[in-house]
């Protein structure tokens, strides 16, 4: 499974998230499948995705449909105060393709 995260990670925050996930376990991430990227585009959880990769965990995907009408706030995502809609995040994922993370298929 391949996932394109929303943001780059901050090392100090990532370290905290890794420690939390050691006990919390596998994260669930809201994401959209985008055929053109052959990958999921994450709508939240960049640090949780990076921590999962470091810990050898494959995140659980909560699939969200591509939509110009649904915002991150509607979904209760981490960066919901940015005002982005799902379509904008997906359409701009090519800018973040260099951040793509891969996980073992389950």
Image: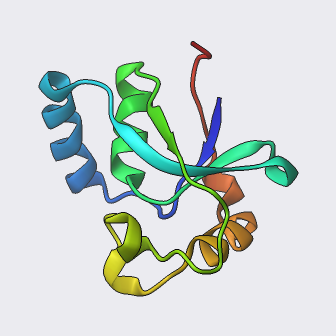
Quadrant where the N terminus is found in the figure: top right
Question: What is the number of callouts on the image?
Answer: 0
Q: Position of residue 4 (x, y in %)?
A: 61, 51
The residue that appears at 38% across and 31% down in the rendered structure is 52
Foreground pick, 40 / 7 = 40
Classify residue 57 as left or right of residue 64: left
The residue that appears at 75% across and 65% down in the rendered structure is 94
Classify residue 21 as left or right of residue 65: left
Foreground pick, 39 / 9 = 39
Q: Quadrant of residue 19?
A: top left
Classify residue 15 as left or right of residue 41: left
Q: How is the image coloured?
A: rainbow
Q: In the displayed structure, would residue 13 be above or below residue 27? A: below
Q: In the displayed structure, would residue 105 be above or below residue 51? A: above
Classify residue 70 as left or right of residue 87: left
Q: Position of residue 67 (x, y in %)?
A: 65, 71
Q: Position of residue 75 (x, y in %)?
A: 39, 65
Residue found farthest to the bottom: 83
Q: Position of residue 18 (x, y in %)?
A: 23, 35
Q: In the displayed structure, would residue 32 be above or below residue 52? A: below
The residue that appears at 48% across and 77% down in the rendered structure is 71
Residue found farthest to the top: 106
Quadrant where the C terminus is found in the figure: top right
């Amino acid at each position: 499974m391949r996932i394109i995260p929303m943001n780059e990670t901050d090392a100090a925050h990532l370290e905290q998230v890794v420690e939390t996930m050691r006990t919390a376990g596998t994260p669930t991430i809201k994401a959209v499948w985008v055929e053109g990227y052959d990958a999921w585009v994450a709508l939240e959880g960049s640090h949780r995705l990076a921590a999962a990769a470091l810990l050898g965990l494959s995140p659980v995907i909560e699939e969200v449909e591509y939509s110009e009408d649904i915002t991150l706030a509607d979904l209760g995502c981490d960066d919901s105060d940015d005002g982005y809609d799902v379509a904008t995040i997906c359409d701009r994922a090519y800018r973040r393709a260099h951040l793509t993370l891969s996980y073992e298929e389950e």
